[in-house]
Image (cartoon, rainbow, N blue to C red):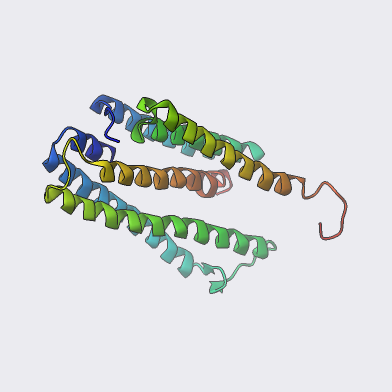
Amino acid sequence: MALAIRSAALGRNTWTYLLLLATAFIGLVFLGIKFTEYYQHYQMHKAPGVWFESNSPDAGAIELFYVFYFAMTGLHAVHMTIGIGLVVLFAFRTAAGSFNSQYHTPLEALGLYWHFVDIVWVFLFAIFYISGLHKS
Amino acid sequence: MSGPSMSLKAYLLTYAGLLALTLSTVLIGYIDLGWGSMFVAVFIAAAKATLVALFFMHALIEKKLVWLVIAGALVWFLILLSLTLGDYITRGWLPFPGK
């Protein structure tokens, strides 16, 4: 994404187009991994309110953890989906010649959105995945 | 909006830095530091977020006004965070039933 905006600023539209498509592809790979994880949680009966089973004495707390987990990563996934849609749309707009080195403000704005969603994931990753690693 | 752009080298170094920080947070994550585990994980995450904001969102080469907006957003975020954690951390301090 960052490289795509740099290419746009330098007027290299073909590179911008290719880099935007690469960004969308990597985003799709992320979502694919995420939904594979969701499917595994579901199979392990860790879907709070839908199908949740646990023999632990802390079952209530564990279910609450999964509520937060699904809500926060799910909201992030929704924003990723919107982002991927916009990245593809802007790739086509780049190909159609809508942007040049003088005017590419929409791409800059999309980049800020994309990187903000990225920062959100940096913190979600730290809270949900890293902080409990030593117990696994 | 089309301000000066950064060099390819800066972006690649940022990317390498983010990967290195991710690797270190995973490795440190395997060590049991008690409450410190969450603290270290969030601290490294904050370092990564700073890298993304400074380079990928090119805050580093922006005008003072943009920095003012970022600072304002951070102050409000810290107010939000401190009020929430102020509740969370002090929950068990008073011996009221049901808290």
Q: Is residue B14 above or below residue A38?
A: above
Q: Is residue A19 above or below residue B13?
A: below
Q: Is residue A52 above or below residue B69?
A: below
Q: Quadrant of residue A102?
A: top left
Q: Is residue B37 left or right of residue A95?
A: right
Q: Quadrant of residue B97?
A: bottom right
Q: Position of residue B75 (x, y in %)?
A: 58, 36
Q: Is residue A44 left or right of residue A55?
A: left
Q: Nearer the viewer, residue A55 or A93?
A: A93
Q: Is residue A131 left or right of residue B20?
A: right
Q: Position of residue A89 (x, y in %)?
A: 22, 55
Q: Position of residue B85 (x, y in %)?
A: 68, 45
**Image quadrant where one finds the N terminus of chain A:** top left
Residue at image coords 34%, 35%: B56
Q: Position of residue B12 (x, y in %)?
A: 28, 30
Residue at image coords 61%, 64%: A63
The answer to whether one can see residue B30 in this image is no
